[in-house]
Amino acid sequence: MTTSTCASSVDISPASPFPLFGYAARPALAKGLGRPIEANVLTFRSNVGLIYLLSTDTLYGGEIADRLASRLAVPRSRVLVMGSHTHFAPGIDHGLSRLGPTHEGYLEWVADRCAKAIYAAETADNITVRWSTARAPRLFSNRRRPVLGVGLRLPKLGQVVTAPNPKGPVDDLIRVITMWSGSRPVAVLWSAACHPVAASEPGVVSPSFPGSVREHIRNFLGQPDLPVLFLQGFSGDVRPNFLSRLPPKSAKAFLRYVAAGFTTYVEPSREQLRDWDRRLSEIVLATLRRGAVGPARPLAPGFQQATRSPKDWERTIRMVKLNLTEDIAVLATNAEVVSSRVKEVAARAPNAIPAGCLDEVIGYWPTDTMIEEGGYEGCLSQIYFPRLDWGAAGGADNLWRSLLDELYTPRIGPHTTH
């Protein structure tokens, strides 16, 4: 069977200063451009027709998919825009105004750029897929630290604070996929589960670590324009492991520091961040090398989708399974999924690539236990996102398993919803 794909990349760096998106309070405009931000695109012909997979250097996929589907004249469900989750890019989602403004002109311009890149992409035939994985120990840190009385409904007790938790779950598995046309690499997909919340200059536009790794991959393969797609893993409660034992100055931060075992997160210096990026890039490149000599699988795209619209929710929850081969699939959802859910996915599909930040995000997807415990991911973050009620969905765990069952339970006949 002949298999083909179209791959392309395009610069989406703003030409003029824009506010950065991802935090509630920020200076009015970015200071400038630290490193170009991009959109990288793959097009597949699947069981339901053409599928467009995009990786963008933005907080989430946002509203790009809606605009792009209109330009391409395809059903909205067939356009999958995966945000890298960088906190150093302009906004692309009007519905998340508490995380920053979205400028309509920039959003339209990005959609135009992506559409033109898709139309200009050359088709590569006879595609084979290779993949490999490796661990990234001690680079990522769980940020939900329980303090005395977690689970008790008492003031100042029963809390989870945002602080280093060495015993908390972390998905440190790095997943790397390369697509080849003969001996020529056509595209690279890679995944890590960590918030990109650090940049060499916090006030500038930057792709954060996904951009640094992308540059290393292109240099290693000798293709400066190679499409490199980053899939943000289940990182809702995980961030880079930049720690300090020096006590903070403010009283509130000092109490959190004591509760967290006399450890706190710090903003890394340029040297620390450069070293962290280098260590992660070395792991990704070593994984890529191993995959390059591993077994080649034929590209076999397949698409399934499961959605729910619980009562009084402002946004629909969406889970997508995009098969790249018969046994390797991207499992993506429009939420910031917490790291402990990786185990449930791995139990059903060991070769699945878990990914969050798809399109218009509903917010965090915690576990029922985390909702009871509270903390930022459990409930506090919801003030920044559209209204939802986990109770109306039968609980966060129930909704999660319901969508997984729909995508992974064998059935007779066509296995597609769209």
Image: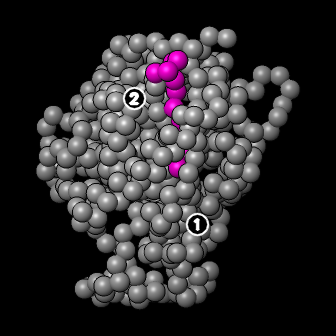
Q: Position of residue 120 (x, y in %)?
A: 35, 13
Please say whether residue 261 is one of the residues in the magenta stretch. no
Q: Position of residue 320 (x, y in %)?
A: 61, 36
- Picture quadrant of residue 64: top left
Q: Position of residue 104 (x, y in %)?
A: 27, 33
Image disc number at residue 111: none
Query: Count of labels shown?
Result: 2
Q: Answer whether residue 411 is visible to the viewer in this image.
A: yes
Q: Is residue 219 above or below residue 375?
A: above
> Quick one: which residue is furthest to the front in this view?
293
Residue at the spot of label 1: 169
Label 1, label 2: how many angstroms apart (C-alpha)?
31 Å
- Of the residues under marks 1 and 2, which one precedes in the sequence? 1
Q: Foreground residue, 49 or 1?
A: 1
Task: Identify the residue shown where x is 63% and y is 54%.
Answer: 342
Task: Identify the residue shown where x is 44% and y is 40%.
Answer: 230
Discs 1, 2 touching: Cβ within 8 Å: no
The amino acid beneath tag 2 is Pro
Task: Identify the residue shown where x is 31% and y is 60%.
Answer: 275
Q: Answer whether residue 417 is visible to the viewer in this image.
A: no
| 1 or 2: mark nearer the eye | 2
Packing grade of label 1 (10 A; few <14, some 14-19, many >=20) is some
Task: Identify the residue shown where x is 35% and y is 34%.
Answer: 218
Residue at the spot of label 2: 227
Q: Which residues are magenta?
A: 174-184
Q: Is residue 48 above or below residue 338?
A: above
Q: Foreground residue, 96 or 325?
A: 325
